[in-house]
Image (cartoon, coloured by chain):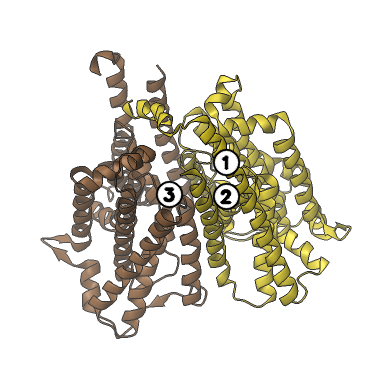
Amino acid sequence: MSSNVLADQAPAFTERSVDLEDRDIRRARRQSQVIRLGSIAALIAVFAYFSAVAPGFANLGNIANVIEQSAVLALLAFGMSIVVLGGGGDVIRGGIDLSLGANLGLCVAVFAVASNAGFSDWLAVAITFGTGAAVGLLNAIAVVGLGVLPLLATLAVMNICAGAELVLTQNTVISTNSPLLGSIVGLSWLGLSVTDWVLVAATVVLIVLVQGTRWGLRLQAVGGQRQAARAAGLRVQAYLAGTYVAAGLLAALAAILQAARLSGSSPGSGDILLSVVLTSLMSTVFSRRLLPTIGGTLLSVLFIGSLINGFQLLNVSSYWVNGVQGVLILFVVAVRSLSTRRGGA
Amino acid sequence: MSASVPMGRPIGAQLVRVTTPAALIALFLIFAAISPTFRTPGNILHILVNNFSLPALVALGMTLVISAGGIDLSVGVAADIAAMLAVTLMEHGSGLGLSLIAGIGGALVVGLLDALLITVFGISPFLATLGVLFIGESVQQLATNGGTPIYLVSNYPAAGLDYLAHGQILGLPLTLWLVALAVVLVQVLLSSTAFGRHLRAIGAEPRVAWHSGLPVRRTTWLVYLLSALLCGLAGLLLSATVKSYVPLSGNAFMLDAIGAVFVGTTISREARPNVLGTLLGVFFFGMLHNGLLLIGWNFYWQQVAIGLLVFIVLGISFLSRRLQTAD
């Protein structure tokens, strides 16, 4: 109880006079612009470097390849960004979904098993989406219904999903073939594969949904100022629950692309989790208000994807990839926090 | 305070706080009823040594970090780097003492890096330690050619290493004594020192702590160094037990430690991390692994069961906490 009283009074310590705030906001806006342009410049510099040095990097086929390899990560990171947007940026108390990687693994396994059990493609797809949504719903029940911290709730759900995947697959590779998977791999239009088009479509739909509709605007209100959103009559709980279910559905969509790429299910899908967290949080540097955005998430994913691809073309050991990702995120976040600190304090 | 509290509330508060211990006791009784092996003293000791000690060391460090309002995703890296340095040195003929000191030194470097990023560069603990985790994984992969384990086969200080892993003092394993030492250290630090008070103040209200002139930076440095020290110890004990270094094996500690600390917060009135709660949480996880195995559950189903049980315990305690504050 006493801690709640303290927390209610806490904002009083940080309030400053209005004109001071005004100046701060202007300065912060200028700085976030610098960061954003700097990040985009870094992205262009990496592209330019690899195009100059790595043979075949700037080749159209290779770019399609990068997008293809990034699609699964991008869809999961979109889900994470939506959850973070709705829950608020505080990683421990705000929104985060640690179950996304395990959910992906479970959905791939469910699709492979359903497909091998003789279900038609569309039924298998429906079951997969049902699984993804159910996992999202479980997160929503824990976070919204029971009030468990998102970090913990999704951690427990992650364990459940990873266990369920093991039960289904017995920790083995399950190969599967179906007309749907075949056409995902085989078909292409304008030089882009089905996977690429799914990513493009998902990006456009989500950008419109999050940045262009009333739902998206209200979602951002819920994430930014939950008390104010509640006072304004928004059904905060429904919005929060919606973000977890949306993330679950995106994991299911990613699972079908993954199943096509790997021709089935193989253990270890959950390892993608940290990259999902990384790219989603990194997306904030591409946004004017330092919030996660869909476009920024896509840029981060493509940035990481082209780094990995460039390294492959240059024959740099893949063991460097994690380290470079780590340094990168630290660099980007340090620049951001140092500049905002100078503005704030 | 007590005058304004409705009559029902204290009882409700007690109920929340007994959720975790009650679940622990209930499961203990269930396992004991089904499996005669489970309830033998030998098996309880086995749980303590093999399923409890090392995660407990890591989780104690995590208790400090989370009390201070942070989080440490690099615990596995600290444990792994310690094991990697010590095992590599021993493989090349170094003495036990030098290897262990080098291992602890390596772990402390990880803690230093965390603290540097958090205090000097102002990066949030989650992102800072996540970055260190990525870098630590790369370092290990580069050092071991992609993750090849290093086994100690011959020409290493076998006697000393055996003592570290299986030695006994007064009839109890050395490992348990080290855990006891760490428990006392962390408990005393948290409850009876200025450092502990500062740390809890920073965790509860960072801005207020800063404006009150508490040594926020110094405290943060110490917290992450202590966490890394305990993780390094866990890594060294692990490598002494398995006589090898397996790259990235420490990552298994991370989520369990975070889970244990937060499960432990459910027994505290203010929902704060605390040593006893953390130990209960770690024992809860350890007992589940051991108990489910002994009652014959398939390894894969164990993970589902553990996830579900943690989900239920967290759900009950957070829900009742919410109902309490709502009425």
Vertical side of A336 occupied by A217: above or below: above
Which colour represents chain B? brown
x and y percent of residue A205 in the render? 76, 41
Vertical side of B316 occupied by B107: above or below: below
> On the rendered structure, is A83 left or right of B291?
right
Residue hosting label 1: A84
Nearest to the observer: residue A144 or residue B107: B107
Residue closest to the far right: A190
Label 3 crowd (10 A; few <14 / some 14-19 / many >=20):
few
Residue hosting label 2: A281
Looking at the image, tell me whether mark 2 or mark 1 is earlier in sequence order: 1
* Number of marks in the rendered image: 3
Residue B152 visible in the shown view: no
Q: Are marks 2 and 3 in contact (CB under 8 Å)?
A: no
x and y percent of residue A231 in the render? 56, 20
Vertical side of B321 occupied by B298: above or below: below
- Residue, x 63% and y 32% (percent of image)? A219
